[in-house]
Structure formats: C-alpha cells, structure tokens
Image (cartoon, helix red, strand yellow):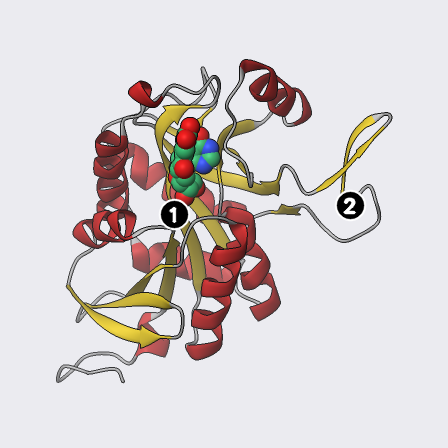
Amino acid sequence: MTVRLPGEQSAPERGRLLVVVAVPAEAEAVLRGLPGSAGPVPLPGGGLHCTRHPAGPEVDVLAAGVGPAAAAAGASAALAAHRYDAVVSAGIAGGFAPRAPIGATVLAGAIVAADLGAETPEGFADVTELGFGTVRHTPPPTAVALAAEALAAGAAGPVVTGTVLTVSTVTGSAERAAALTARHPGAAAEAMEGFGVAEAAARHGVPAFELRTVSNPVGPRDRAAWRIGEALAALERAFAALPCPEFLKEARRG
Ligand SMILES: O=C(O)c1cccc(C(=O)CC[C@H]2O[C@@H](n3cnc4c(=O)[nH]cnc43)[C@H](O)[C@@H]2O)c1
C-alpha cells in the first residue's frame, strides 16, 4: 500500500523506477544515495524497499539474487505487482581495461548476454545466430546520455558508456577476457544480472537500463584486487547524482 503525504502527487504523475540489484549490500548503497526514506514492502521471493519522497519519483530497490535467472525472476515479480516507468539493473561489476578502471561508473549503451549460445566447430555462436531470439537489449539512448552527463558531474571516478556483458560465469583468465573483447569490442564491463532484468522488462513493455560500478578488473582471478567498498561507495554516489525525475521523463519518451 502506498502512503501519501498531504499535497503529494500520485505515483503515476511522479513516476516510479525499479532498481534491481543482486545482494543487500548493493541495495543499501543505492538507498543511501537516494533522497527520502525507505520502507520494506513484501514481495514473493525478494526484499523490495520502496522509497518515499514527497517531490521526486518513487524508487523501489529490489535485491533479487545473483545471476540472470534470479534477476529475471525477481524483476518479473516486481513488474507484475506494480506499474513502473523504467527498470535499472545496478550493482558492482568487473571492468574491461583500460576503459573501465576500478571505481568507474559504467552506463550500458547495450545490455548483451555474452555466453548464451553454443560452441560450434567455427567457435561460439550466440542464440540470435542460432535462430532463437535475442542476446541484446538497447536502453533508450537519450535517457542514457542524460544520466551519463549528470553522473559525470556528480561521480568521483570516470563515467563510461559502453556495452555491459551479462555472464553466468565470472571471467577468471586473460584468455577469456581477450575472447570477450574480441567478440564485443565495445564492452566496458561484465556482470551477471543485466540481461535477465532486461528480458523481464521487455516482456512487461518497460525500458531497461544498467548502471554498474567497477570493483575488479575482468581478467585473471585475483581476489586481493577486489575493491568492493570502493565500488559500493561509487554506486551510492551514482544514485545520489542520478536526476530521477528527468531520467524517467526521458526514459518514458523512449
Ligand atoms: O570468485 C571470483 O573470482 C569472483 C570474481 C569477481 C566477482 C565474483 C562474484 O561472485 C561477484 C558476483 C556479483 O558481483 C557482480 N560482479 C562483480 N564483479 C564481476 C565480474 O568480474 N564478473 C561478473 N560479475 C561480477 C555480479 O553481477 C554478481 O552480482 C567472484
């Protein structure tokens, strides 16, 4: 149930944004960056936190779990329960050097499923090449550009717009990183949820975006090199800098 303050605009006028993250630490970072207070709202299979702000849009933050399947299931449940104007897959990510160093913020110009396909004698073939649907979603470019400009003014680290790959297995070798950049020259980051969120959003007719902050380089596995605290701080700053009303208006225009 939505509680309205006297004089407060209704949600359809103010707009409503869904942010899907994987884990509670990411949800807390996003919520710290957003104005207004937040309260939990029950949703089957996940914790949904709805923010209340008298002037701005409602922003609901859902920690749906790690990986594309959990993300798609969680996003779909939220999208079926409420009416949203846009969905953002958000969280920490691996960054492709040199484009997206640790602490950078990456906005997806394209959200691509990088390992959804088949190995063939000629190499990897994605499901589109195999004739089974899509591996790519393209967020509305004018809304991405608006967000990128605002984040560049408000974020401490670099802000990069590029392809964000969705993988089911975290890259752990230089060979795999090189294979991904050879296949996706525009790749800036890899994470594990964006494509799942974008698939759910497409089925509900809602525009999907992805915003990531870089915690580790994509490449040989080195847990000592992770900077999760730095990436979560960048995530908080990114949501503090995101002009939600203008972003939603632009997202609605498509
Ligand atoms: O065990 C490892 O070597 C390892 C390296 C990086 C990340 C992980 C995770 O399990 C984190 C998964 C979680 O965080 C996002 N994430 C962060 N960095 C990456 C990455 O380099 N590649 C893919 N996903 C990453 C992801 O979206 C998940 O939510 C383990």
Query: Which quadrant would the C terminus be assigned to in this image?
Result: bottom right
From this view, report whether residue 207 is shown above or below residue 145. below
Say what amino acid the circle numbered 1 marks: Ala
Residue 45 vs residue 94, the one in the foreground:
45
Q: Residue most toward the right?
A: 121
Question: Based on the displayed image, in which of its 4 quarters is residue 91 positioned?
Answer: top left
Read off the residue under disc 2: 128
Q: CA distance from mark 1 to mark 2?
A: 25 Å
Amino acid on which the number 2 mark rests in the picture: Thr
* Quadrant for the N terminus in the image: bottom left
- Residue count near mark 1 (Cα–Cα under 10 Å), binned few <14, some 14–19, many ≥20: many
Could you say which disc has been placed on residue 152 in the image?
Answer: none
Quarter of image, res 123: top right
Residue at left offset 22%, top offset 47%: 29
Identify the residue at horizontal 23%, vertical 71% (top origin): 40
Residue drawn where x is 22% and y is 29% of the image? 156
Q: How far across and how far down the image is residue 167, in percent?
A: 56, 39
How packed is label 2: few (under 14 Cα within 10 Å), some, or many (20 or more)? few
Can you tell me which quadrant of the image ligand 1 is in?
top left
Residue 21 at x, y percent in the picture: 37, 52
Q: Is residue 249 above or below residue 40?
A: above
Q: Write down the residue under mark 1.
A: 90
- Residue 7 shown left or right of residue 72 in the figure: left
Residue at 34%, 56% in the rendered image: 246
Task: Indicate the position of residue 80 as horizontal and vertical percent values.
Answer: 49, 76
